[in-house]
Image: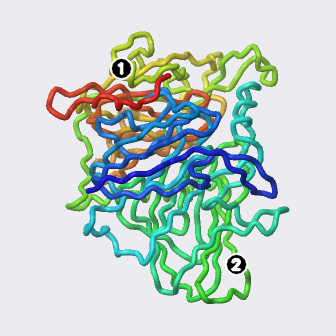
């Protein structure tokens, strides 16, 4: 293992897409940002210097940060943000993890343009559990607004209504073929006939789950969220914001150009932009008679396509990579996730109300100082540990609200406390309040096993009998289906404060977030380490 040093300068840069220009916040002037490479067991030091007018913080999404929550990144959860003109060195060791992850800004909506690939290679000399690819290619998917993204969300918060949807999606920074704005080009992946490529696909979009496919080619899925899966073939991938998917593609079509497409998946009546981002797979040295072999993207509401992909994911569960699913459960939790309404006297557009989101009907209130610091230094009055382990009685589930029930949520900075090494089963249940929706729920500090998933209301008597406790997929971002539930299990073996939230940024902003507080253990190396000297102050 070695120590790797990176410099991330957060700077403004002008960018032109969809035939219009705007300044964007970037790392080192790049969109997507630089790819961070490391190997399993390496220590990574990233010096982040803030040269913009916003406060910033960076999250290393999926890195477990064992005992080093200070380097996790979510603003006001594990650190105060880095103010303009200042720096902070994120210092962490990648223990027992390898695969594709992402890094991104974790404050405001800066993630829109401040993100990049985080690639952890196996230890030197350790092979992949699948045939070595000829080449590896990061494929970063994102969303693009013509207007300033901070203005988009601020305007929404003022009105009380939903923010404007994006104007396009991008593949490695390019929308590709865009109607009414030609000659934008797009990302091209050059391939050689007969060779196999490993695509490291990352969904860095703010608010949309995406389908991904390549005309004329099958994809063999070998990894998600930096955990190996039993390989399977598919022609379509579904990937939620915060998720990553490694796919092998063999260039077996001899010659020509093939379209690569990323298009939205949203099986609720809520409007999304339906532009498909495109890129090109090009057999080098061959001419394409027709410009591209077109593939039709699945319709936005292709729930079956999405579910069959998600249900195909199983942990590799080999001798080397066993699935260590917790079998005995200490905390049996049920959290509802969904939308709601609160009053907002100044929100004229929404008649004095505003859309909010909640977990167990609690809309999370962001503190003004970091929770991890408050916890470490025993500062009282910043949070409470009374987050409910179950929804309020007779609460609305996927079927919507009972008549006369209130849409209003409660609010607070509430944490759920876990003893060191306790085991958790958590069922995440979508509610039908306002509208049922999919929620990619991301847990910081842990990987979890996704042991069950279903549509409708979770049944605590019958559903656990159907759980997969042998080879469930292990990941860091769950797929809560529209009007359904997902059950996850993890071991609380990482002391600190760990954020959990919907990775659709609009839902996070609205309050679909909470945090776990994991106590120190009694043994050696079971305590949160002290904070680094340069940790920013609020
Ligand atoms: Cu990728 Cu808390 O986020």
Q: How is the image coloured?
A: rainbow
- Judging depth in this view, the residue of 534 and 111 nearest the camera is 534
Which residue is painted at 52% across and 19% down in the image?
Answer: 368
Q: Height in image: 316 above or below 327?
A: below
Q: Height in image: 154 above or below 172?
A: above
Looking at mark 2, is its residue's CB closer than 8 Å to ligand 1?
Answer: no
Residue 241 pos. (x, y %): 55, 48
The residue that mark 2 highlights is: 292
The residue that mark 1 highlights is: 375
Q: Report helix, strand or loop for mark 2.
A: loop
Q: Height in image: 131 above or below 371?
A: below
Q: Height in image: 44 above or below 379?
A: below
Which residue is painted at 41% across and 31% down in the image?
Answer: 534
Number of the label disc, if any, that sits on residue 316:
none
Q: CA distance from mark 1 to mark 2?
A: 56 Å
- Quarter of the figure with residue 406: top right
Looking at marks 1 and 2 on the same chain, the residue that comes earlier in the sequence is marked by: 2
Residue 396 pos. (x, y %): 55, 25
- Quarter of the figure with residue 333: top left
* Viewer can see residue 354: yes
Numbered disc total: 2
Which residue is painted at 46% across and 82% down in the image?
Answer: 195
Residue 399 pos. (x, y %): 58, 32
Residue extending farthest left: 523
Looking at the image, residue 343 sits to the left or right of residue 464; the answer is right
């Amino acid at each position: 293992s070695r120590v790797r040093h990176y410099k991330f300068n957060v700077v403004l840069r002008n960018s032109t897409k969809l035939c219009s220009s705007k300044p964007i916040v970037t790392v080192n002037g790049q969109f997507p940002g630089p790819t961070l490479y490391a190997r399993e067991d390496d220590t990574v030091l990233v010096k982040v210097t803030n040269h913009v007018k916003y406060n910033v913080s960076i999250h290393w999404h999926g890195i477990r940060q064992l005992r080093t929550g200070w380097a996790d990144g979510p603003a006001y959860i594990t650190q105060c943000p880095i103010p303009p003109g200042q720096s902070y060195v994120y210092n962490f060791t990648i223990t027992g993890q390898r695969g594709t992850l992402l890094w991104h800004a974790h404050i405001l909506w800066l993630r829109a343009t401040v993100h990049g690939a985080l690639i952890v290679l196996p230890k030197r000399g350790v092979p992949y559990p699948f045939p070595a690819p000829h080449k590896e290619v990061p494929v970063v998917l994102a969303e693009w607004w013509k207007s300033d993204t901070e203005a988009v969300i601020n305007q929404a918060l003022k009105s009380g209504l939903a923010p404007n949807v994006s104007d396009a999606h991008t593949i490695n920074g390019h929308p590709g073929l865009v109607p009414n704005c030609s000659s934008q080009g797009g990302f091209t992946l050059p391939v050689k006939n007969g060779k196999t490529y490993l695509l490291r696909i990352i969904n860095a979009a703010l608010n949309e789950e995406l389908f991904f496919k390549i005309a004329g080619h099958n994809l063999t899925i070998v990894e998600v969220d930096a955990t190996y899966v039993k390989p399977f073939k598919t022609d379509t991938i579904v990937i939620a914001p915060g998720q990553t998917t490694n796919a092998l593609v063999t260039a077996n079509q001899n010659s020509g150009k093939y379209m690569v497409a990323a298009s939205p998946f949203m099986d609720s009546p809520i409007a999304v932009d339906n532009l498909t981002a495109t890129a090109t797979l090009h057999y080098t040295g061959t001419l394409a008679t027709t410009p591209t072999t077109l593939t039709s993207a699945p319709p936005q509401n292709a729930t079956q396509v999405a579910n069959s992909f998600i249900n195909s994911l199983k942990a590799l569960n080999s001798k080397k990579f066993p699935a260590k699913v917790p079998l005995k459960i200490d905390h049996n939790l049920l959290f509802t996730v969904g939308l709601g309404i609160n009053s907002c006297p100044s929100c004229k557009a929404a008649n004095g109300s505003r859309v909010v989101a909640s977990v167990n009907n609690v809309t999370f209130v962001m503190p003004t100082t970091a929770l991890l610091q408050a916890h470490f230094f025993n500062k009282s009055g910043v949070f409470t540990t009374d987050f409910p382990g179950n929804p309020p009685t007779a609460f609305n589930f996927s079927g919507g609200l009972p008549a006369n029930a209130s849409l209003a949520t409660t609010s607070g900075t509430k944490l759920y406390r876990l003893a060191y090494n306790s085991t958790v089963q958590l069922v995440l249940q979508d509610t039908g309040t306002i509208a049922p929706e999919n929620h990619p729920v991301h847990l910081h500090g842990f990987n979890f096993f996704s042991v069950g998933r279903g549509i409708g209301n979770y049944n605590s008597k019958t559903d656990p009998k159907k759980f997969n406790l042998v080879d469930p997929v292990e990941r860091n971002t769950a797929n809560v289906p529209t009007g359904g539930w997902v059950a996850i299990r993890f071991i609380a073996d990482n002391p600190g404060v760990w954020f959990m939230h919907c990775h659709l940024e609009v839902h996070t902003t609205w309050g679909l977030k909470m945090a776990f507080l994991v106590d120190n253990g009694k043994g050696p190396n079971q305590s949160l380490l002290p904070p680094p000297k340069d940790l920013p102050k609020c």
